[in-house]
Image: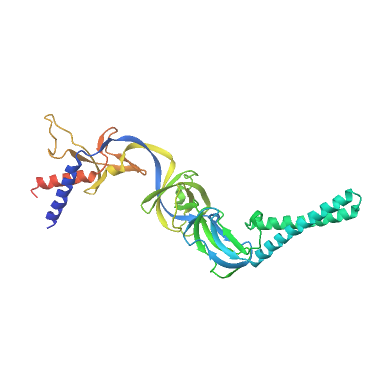
Amino acid sequence: MKNKILTVLLTFGAVLFANEAVLPTQKATLHSFKKSLALNAKVIQLSNAQQSITSLVSGHLEKYFVKPAEDVKKGDKIALIESIELSRMSAEYIALKKQYASAEKNYESVKKLYEKGMSSMAQLNAELIKKSNIAAQLTTLQSQLETLGIDTQKLHKATSNFILYAHSDGRVAALLKPLHSSVSTDEAVVSIVKNQAYYIKSYLPLEYATKVQAGDKIVVDYAGKKLTSHITQIMPKVDATTQRVIVLSSVDEPTQRLFLGVYLKATLYFAQADSFVAVKKSALSFFQNEWVVFVPSKEDEHGEDEEHHEVPYSLKVVQIIASDENYVGVLGLREGEEYVSDKSYYTKSLLLKSSLGEHGH
């Protein structure tokens, strides 16, 4: 029964191979490999990547404009707070503007009378002092209102609506206050995680601590995607639990929705590099407990394959001695030697089918 299943699978593979025509090949070349080391790592954010948006006035939380996990941009509305304090300040500002306009009018009138000798210098100075005091109060209140995001040029009536805005691009981590609750001045209302503030925290064995340096590359496998980061900090204190050196590397590429605290497999590539004969990772196949690469079969002097007439490829056992994201350094191939660079499973299926045929299966 097992032989029948294997035969069906191999026949299917041979059909696929036949439909594929000639498989892609390349020549083995010298490739520079940085020395690498497998590490355990996890996604983190530094403390300054978390931003709490606080209310600048006390009031009543009326509405959220965002939801948890929602992406926001700098300047987006976050929440609406109804504030009696803001209502009082805006009403006072409008009243002071009217008082200032009246005081300025009175000053100009007294000034004209003074110029005609119909008013004293003391009266003129009194009006000037009155106008200056109102102007000072108005300037102070205007500054306070503009700090709260109120456009005083458009303020024509008292308002209690205070709107919180996002200070930077990011993602809403949490809504910290329930709706219709009271909010105090400087109380955090929403927590936002800034974009592009992700780091990889890797755990490095102590014996490699003197070999690693800032700028070395760390590649992690996150949900089937390769993320590249570069070391920015080598922490001076050893992790108490693992007794390993902590290395922090910043994620280079624009990335959103990474989950904090998730553990990952990471590869550290040291700055020092060595060159080896290399093939693409897609060329490797595991065959009879050994790594192999398929190469075009050599022809004898009569133009026939030395081993199998129907199989245009043969295998070579190789030993992996280095690797990076795309290539592996191998022993067992010569520089310039041609090899099947992709879809090696087609070749493997054909060789297995030929082998079964030779043994009468």
Q: Is residue 73 visible?
A: yes
Query: Which residue is at the front of the view, 217 or 96?
Result: 96
Q: Number of numbered discs present?
A: 0
Q: Choose between 149 and 278: the one closer to the eye.
A: 149
Q: Quadrant of residue 161?
A: bottom right
Res. 246 in view: no
Answer with left or right where residue 90 lies relative to residue 18: right
Where does the image place residue 99, in percent across and percent down from the top left?
A: 76, 59
Identity of the residue drawn at 16% across and 49% down: 12
- Say if 239 sits above or below 323 in the image: below
- The extreme top residue here reads 301
- Residue 166: horizontal and vertical position, in percent? 55, 56
With 151 as the anchor, is 355 left or right in this view? Answer: left
The single residue placed furthest to the bottom in the displayed view is 181
Q: Quadrant of residue 141?
A: bottom right
Q: Position of residue 131 (x, y in %)?
A: 80, 55
Q: Is residue 182 left or right of residue 170?
A: right
In-front residue for pair 81/331: 81
Question: Residue sitting at 12 percent across and 55 percent down?
Answer: 4
Q: Quadrant of the N terminus?
A: bottom left
Please state if 231 lies on the left or on the right of 282 as rendered. Answer: right
Residue 192 drawn at (x, y percent): 52, 58
